Amino acid sequence: MRFIPLTPARLVEELAAWIRTTVLPSAVRPSLGTAGAPGGTVIGFDGPAEVGATDLADQVGEVLRSSGCPVVRASTTWWWRPSALRLELGRHDLDMLMTGWVDSEALTRELIGPVREGLPHLTRLRDPVSDRSVRQQYSPGRPGAVLLLDGPFLFAAGLQLDAVVGLEVGRGALGRALPPDRAWWAAGFERYRDEYEPLGKWDVVLAYDHPSAPAAAGLVGEGAGRR
């Protein structure tokens, strides 16, 4: 795996270009209606907000929008189950963290599926801080929309994704980034690497210990969308 150093701005531009020129042409999208308009595409940014996954997806989304691409942004954090369900096996249960915190069924039913079909959708279900449902209005569907979905443990959630950008962060950098109440997540990321082997599944791998000096593999002059 060959990593190419990039400036943060160049990384954002290259990711947006990769989505436009590689992921979208290769994604299997349904045809909508009699006009045959393309359905939506779902691209994951696999990593926690604390190391920069959310900010990076936001920036890529802005570049895509500026080029005329209809973009939907969402984070799995806003699709957590109620705390009573997330924590029913204990506050530090790693199995639940990886596979039980995100309500994958609701996320697929209310966001991923509708975006693929060009239908109205929700981008948020539950406030992760207040643990209350978000009374969000449905956003109108748009043909050919690109959903950029960020969050940790994406492969463990069993979501249907067309391509995934992975943020690879070392143990030390991850430990510094996680707040004290989530320090136990570090063990979850170790489990995730061992059990789900995301490094071999990510379409683009970002060395992201230092977001001000990232490097990318599978992006510049190479790489392909998930088929």
Image: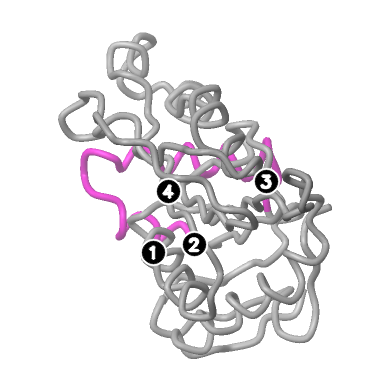
Q: Which mark is residue 52?
A: 1
- 178 vs 105, nearest the viewer: 105
Q: Kindly indicate whether the residue at mark 2 contacts the one at mark 3 (C-beta within 8 angstroms).
A: no
Q: Tell me the SS state at disc 3.
A: loop
Q: Position of residue 32 (x, y in %)?
A: 73, 45
Q: Which residue is mark 3?
A: 161
Q: Which mark is residue 74?
A: 4
Q: Which residue is mark 2?
A: 170
- Part of the protein shown in magenta: 170-198
Q: Which residue appears at 45% of the width and 45% of the height? A: 140
Displayed quadrant of residue 58: bottom left
Q: Tell me the SS state at disc 2.
A: loop
Q: Residues within 10 Å of mark 3 (few under 14, many from 20)?
A: some
186 magenta-colored: yes
Displayed quadrant of residue 81: top left
* Circle nearer the N terminus (4, 1): 1
Q: CA distance from mark 3 to mark 2?
A: 25 Å
* Circle nearer the N terminus (3, 2): 3
Q: Is residue 202 above or below residue 138?
A: below
